[in-house]
Amino acid sequence: MYNFQEIEKKWQDLWENDKVFFVKNEKDSLSVPKFYCLEMFPYPSGRIHMGHVRNYAIGDAIARFKRLKGYNVLHPIGFDSFGLPAENAAIKHKTNPAEWTKNNIEYMINQLKELGFSYDWSRLAITSEPTYYRWEQLFFLHMYKKGLAYKKNSLVNWCGSCNTTLANEQVEDGKCWRCGSDVTVKNMDQWFLKITDYAEELLKDIDTLDGWPDKVKTMQKNWIGKSSGLTVMFKIIADSGDGNDNNSKIGDNFIEIFTTRPDTIFGATYIAMSPFHPLAESIIKNSKDLEKLETMKHNSLISKDISEKEGFFTGSYAVNPFTNKTIPLFIANFVLMDYGTGAIMSVPAHDSRDYEFAKKYGIEIIQVIEPAKKSAKNISECRQDLPYTGGGILMNSGDFSGIDSEEAKKKISDYAENKNIGKKVTNYRLRDWGISRQRYWGCPIPILYCEKCGIVPLDESDLPLMLPDDVVFTGEGASPLKKHKSFINTICPKCGGKAERETDTMDTFVESSWYFLRYTLSEEKEKNPFKSEDVSYWLPVDQYIGGVEHAVMHLLYSRFFVKALRDLNYIKLDEPFKNLLTQGMVIKNGAKMSKSKGNVVDPDGLIKKFGADTVRLFVLFAAPPEKDLEWSDSGVEGAYRFINKFYKTAVDFSEILKDTKGKFYEYEIKKAEVNPSVKELIYILNGVIEKTETEMNGRYHFNTVISSSMELINAFNDFTTALNEEKLALLNKSDKYLLKYFLNSVVFILYPFIPHVCSELFEILNGSFIEDENWPEKIDAGYSKENCNIAVQVNGKMRDVVIAGIDSDEDTVLNIAMDSPKIKRYAEDKRAIKKIIYVKNKLLNIIV
RNA sequence: GCGAGAGUGGCGAAACUGGUAUACGCACUGGACUUAGAAUCCAGCGGAGCAAUCCAUGGGGGUUCGAGUCCCCCCUUUCGCACCA
């Protein structure tokens, strides 16, 4: 049994004391390529969990491999330390959030060190420290000046349980992403970042992200949700008559609708508008209906969930400018106010939602699209199969009848623009990013409100605006900042009069939108957020690793932030993350590991029992990184068993290698005297080295690399047991150096996964330090493959495997095959052979 | 409902461009060592059959000399989006 406790401690201390993984921003040295390996930094919840271990083991494997290959590797870590749990803990345990956070970070840093990750600790970033968040406040001020940060009163998502607002991205299925309670809607003053200014660029640049999984790219595209369509003005009239209405309230009003299907406009049989539409009240004719409107508004505020479509007729009508027909105006609960114009033309024949509503309220349905005449079946079916939402040929559409729907979209849009009743527009689903949070433990927004001057941004020289320390947590009502007099009351820098500070803090996703830039800074940290030249050197991140749960939020915000900082002249960069790996979840008993499921496995206990190397090896071996990982206790034991076997094999054999002094690659091998089995071992090894390099260069299927090295160790052990001890002692120098090379190579291959034991074994074998050496080159030990197995098929069915000389021609192999009794049974007579397919050194297929 | 991915032994999984399916590991079974156990080592391990052989990569078709891999249909399942007009 190897003493993992001693070995792991020894190497961790050495790594730390010698600052082995500290890097320099070596901009001058163009000969050394850089590699930025980044893992999503953790929230300091208290302890590292298995998801972290997996995430960081993957990152560490890549970082360590790249370092062996000679890259200048930046591999940093930090803590995303603002956020609600700290505050909730403060309320629950009467602690201070800063204190709680600090303790957690200390504990977790220790855990990360015990796991042996190769971080450059000098670049540690902790987002809740003023040295970090002061820069965020500076960015905010610059964004404010440029109009990228603005305040508006709007309907926002509100989580009553967290007592704060949420961004759209943070609402999942009408529930809070963090605590799962129902989200309601509130009217509030909020700060927003103008991410919509970048909607088009964010969308367009997705196509440059070749190293991202398609899944994530699609999710972002859908989230941005670009759609092009047409807005059309419909004239409002007060009754269905001639339109000469004398109701002064309505007058010459128009209602503007948005549609992506202008081709269906002749089928519009009613207009549906949001209850929040500014015209809603004025077009309602019956005062009783105003109550309905209020109820509907109220219901939409309580819950985002609309399971049943509801609506009512307002008593007013509008004129479809294409048909000149009068159609009713409805208020409907499913129409969104903040998308398009807040009103839609409803075409029940060709939209399932409009259809459902029309059926419920008995509104006319007019078919205007006929499915394209691809098959006769479709035509006969189309008339009863409404709603039909696809494209086709227009019908019942006046002059546009008979035109294909794609063409009709253009023609009808052009017509509307020419007549000045409509406009082609592009809409995005993406909304501006609401960053105000009504909580204490976050970055204060550097704004104050002056009685005279209104909204006043803080002076840059007053940064950082520190979060006050002396706060009381009751858990009730508003943020403790609201009650903190000395924080709130201040003086306006403009007029010297009385002013009050903003008490909201920023969404914690703001911190994580630029932390990867902060890591590039190695000196003068108090003077800069980062330096443009460092960012240019290190970015983009060559490999980013984290969970899919951040596919939209964090990754979209970060992309936006980089583009915004670029336009504020901080950096020259368009996209932060070149390659993205989204690792799967850690599963136990079919469910994601979580406290609430009670199926968590604590890394601490495992490290104590088996060591960090074992935990890391299991986590990388049990599944490829992008797949979910099923936890298995016996699998962990298997990993432990393998490391022990590996260790014993290498240490035992190092005795035999005692007289091989110096570097294994400095001895000149005499090929003629090399034992054939040794030659073969080297031959197998070369294949694995090559395979490892391809895997470690982007596919990252560590599980297959590990299984290959297990095969190498098995082959090595087979070799040593086949020779007995006496014969082993008789091995010549060339054999020994080659075997030393073999063991060294396996140590190299496994080092990214189990660095402690490999560092130790390298030292035992060579007396030197593995970090000072380079990844092994393939070598030729004089092995030439003489024979190979050839699969022989008859009529495509496997019948036998024969041995033939390497690179034999078709006739030779055929003759060998025809001698085989198993083949004779199926292809007795050579003359009956119709065709032969021969793949050199692999396969022979005889067709009879 | 829309979009994307995944279905291979008892289990986690291999199989790079179509070419010997089940590598590697786990579990299991037998054996060696031991007073006994643990650990370790050796052997076996998709299914059926005494055997020759046959059948097996979710199901059904197709392309091909040859399909886990390519094409079409279906089933199951995971994930994302869901009144965005």
Image (cartoon, coloured by chain):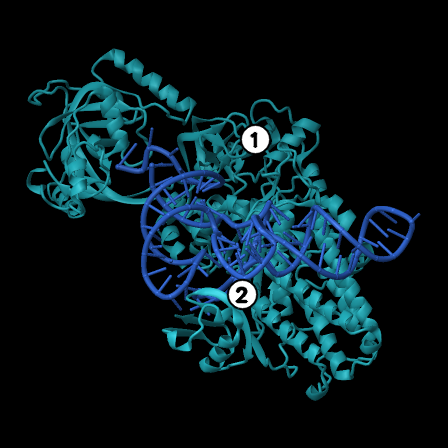
Q: Nearer the viewer, residue A614 or A505?
A: A614
Reading the image, the residue beneath label 2 is A537
For the question of whether residue A522 can be seen, the reply is: no
Residue beneath the point at 72% across and 81% down: A675
Reading the image, the residue beneath label 1 is A489
Tag 2 subunit: A
Q: Is residue A474 left or right of residue A399?
A: right
Colour-to-chain, cyan: A
Q: Is residue A479 left or right of residue A274?
A: right
Q: Secondary structure at mark 1?
A: strand
Q: Indicate the amino acid at tag 1.
A: Asn
Q: In what quadrant of the picture does the C terminus of chain A appear?
A: bottom left
For the question of whether residue A47 can be seen, the reply is: yes
Q: Position of residue A337 (x, y in %)?
A: 32, 31
Q: Position of residue A749 (x, y in %)?
A: 66, 66
Q: Quadrant of residue A327?
A: top left
A391, above or below A524, in the image: above
Q: Residues within 10 Å of mark 2 (few under 14, many from 20)?
A: some
Q: In what quadrant of the picture does the N terminus of chain A appear?
A: bottom right
In 3D space, how far apart are the residues under numbered discs 1 and 2 (Cα atoms)? 44 Å
Q: Is residue A154 left or right of residue A227?
A: right
Of the residues under marks 1 and 2, which one precedes in the sequence? 1
Q: Residues within 10 Å of mark 1 (few under 14, many from 20)?
A: some
* Chain B color in figure: blue
Q: Nearer the viewer, residue A558 or A139?
A: A558
Residue beneath the point at 28% across and 24% down: A332
Q: Position of residue B61 (x, y in %)?
A: 33, 52
